[in-house]
Image (cartoon, rainbow, N blue to C red):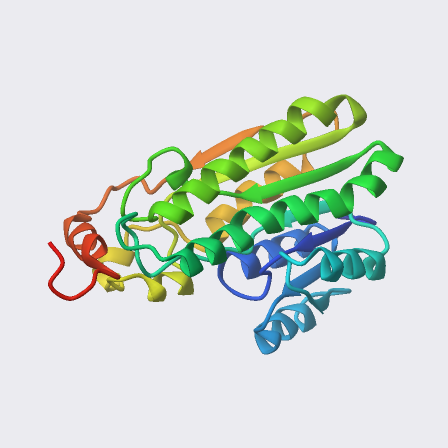
Amino acid sequence: MGELEGKTALVTGGGRGIGRAISQSLAGMGAKVVVNYRSDRSAAEETAHSLPGATAHQADVSDPAQVDAMVKAIGRVDVLVNNAGHSSHARSVRWVGRKEWDGVMAVNLTAVYVLTQAVLPGMLERQTGTIITVSSLAALKAGLIGGAPYGAAKAAVRNLMQHVHNTLRNQGIRATTIMPAEVDTPILDKRPLNPDVTARATMMQAEDVARAIVLCATLPPRTVIEEIVMSPTILRDQSKDLAVAARAGAPEGAL
């Protein structure tokens, strides 16, 4: 019997990349996994169908009405993993437009607030529950790799998890922030400079982050890991990435 047998885990953005690895790992520990997705139905259903007892559920996690409907349909959430993420094309604060800024904030920050608020009533009633949020090393080291809106959102969501921890820990609620550096996942394809094979060779893999999340979710309820910072052992040369990121989204002729 797995350590999460009888528990239900909701994983946002659970169909691809880190989300898929998390879904697989939690299911391997016995959890009934709900794979949330916004638009990539095929990937979410493929992941869910490969896991015993798992289901795929569509919802825009930044929309309170859709989130409330999803949580009510699930019935019980013991472990919430806020994994869904979105980054901007423009990285420098000089060139990020308001639409890009709002989009990044909606997925990386507002959605975590909406989901946390939706699952808390049930967790508080049971006096137990685990909320794990995938933030980023960009929350601690702002710059062009993550970009201005992404780094700001990930720093804010770290603060939000600290708030949950500090105010609700005595009611059995565990809140954890995972802050990984570069992970070799499909989201890298959307960067201003798509990292090549050599650049990806030293990066962490999705299953590395999933292992950290499983550790946080399976510890005895008496123990909480507040934060985990993860980074590749070998630091690659990011100079080309930084140069391209600094110009991404800039108007033609801008200095």
Please name whichever residue, 175 or 28, is drawn nearer the observer in this view of the structure. Answer: 175
The part of the image, by quadrant, that contains residue 15 is bottom right
Question: Is residue 225 among what the camera can see?
Answer: no
Residue drawn at x 69%, y 56% is 27
- Residue 104 visible from this viewpoint: yes
Q: Residue at x 20, y 63 (%)?
A: 251
The residue sitting at the right extreme is 125
Image location of residue 216, percent across then percent down: 62, 36
Q: Position of residue 123 (x, y in %)?
A: 81, 39
Name the residue located 80 percent from the left edge and 34 percent from the top edge.
128
Whether residue 72 sits left or right of residue 97 in the image: it is: right
Quarter holding the C terminus? bottom left
Asked if 159 appears above or below 182 in the picture, the reply is: above
Figure quadrant of residue 89: bottom left
Depicted 68 relative to depicted 220: above or below: below
Residue 18 vs residue 98, the one in the foreground: 98
Q: Quadrant of residue 176?
A: top right
Residue 243: image location, x then y, percent: 15, 53
Q: Taking 219 as reference, is 148 above or below it?
A: below
Check the image and name the residue furthest to the bottom.
42
